[in-house]
Amino acid sequence: MKLIHENLTYKINGLCFKVHREMGRFRSERQYCDKLEILFKEEKINFKREYELVKLSDVNSLGNRVDFLIDNLIILDVKAKKFITKDDYFQMLRYLETADLQLGIIINFRNTYLKPKRIINSKFKSVSSG
């Protein structure tokens, strides 16, 4: 089975591992995001930072601001806390459904070993089948 957006997720994860190696575990989310922004620019990866997702048909979508929207395909949610919670997963699912995107990644830089969590939107409606 082929991974969703395999090449792009490989690049994103690689940059996250680089940030984790260079900065360690005990920085703020903002510091990790600042470093990722620099690396995304260096690697010429198209992204929007602190992007507000708005679905005109859904008043509940207001206030859904993602850390990174990468190449209009993947949402990256940066965390720096002890544990990823169910609420974090539900938040990502809400983001994915609002943006009608297929894949989100939650990355918690507080972990000793970085473990990117891929979240798949089962309600994704592809415009094209390619």
Image (cartoon, rainbow, N blue to C red):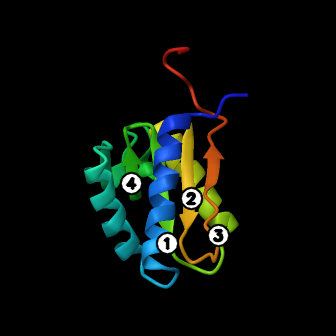
Left/right placement of residue 72 relative to residue 100 reads: left
- Secondary element under disc 4, as helix, strand or loop, is strand
Q: Which residue is mark 3?
A: 84
Q: Is residue 88 above or below residue 61?
A: below
Q: Which residue is mark 1?
A: 21
Q: Earlier in the sequence, mark 2 or mark 1?
A: 1
- The residues tagged by marks 4 and 3 sit, at their Cα atoms, a distance apart of 18 Å
Q: Earlier in the sequence, mark 3 or mark 2?
A: 3
CB atoms of marks 3 and 2 within 8 Å: yes
Callout 1 amino acid: Arg
CB atoms of marks 2 and 4 within 8 Å: no
Location of residue 30 (image quadrant)? bottom left
Q: Nearer the viewer, mark 2 or mark 1?
A: 1
Q: Which residue is mark 2?
A: 106
Q: Which residue is mark 4?
A: 68
- The residues tagged by marks 3 and 2 sit, at their Cα atoms, a distance apart of 8 Å
Q: Earlier in the sequence, mark 4 or mark 3?
A: 4
What residue is at 36 percent from the left and 61 percent from the top?
A: 36
Tag 2: Cα neighbours inside 10 Å, few (<14), some, or many (≥20)? some
Tag 1: Cα neighbours inside 10 Å, few (<14), some, or many (≥20)? few
The one nearer the camera, 2 or 101, is 2
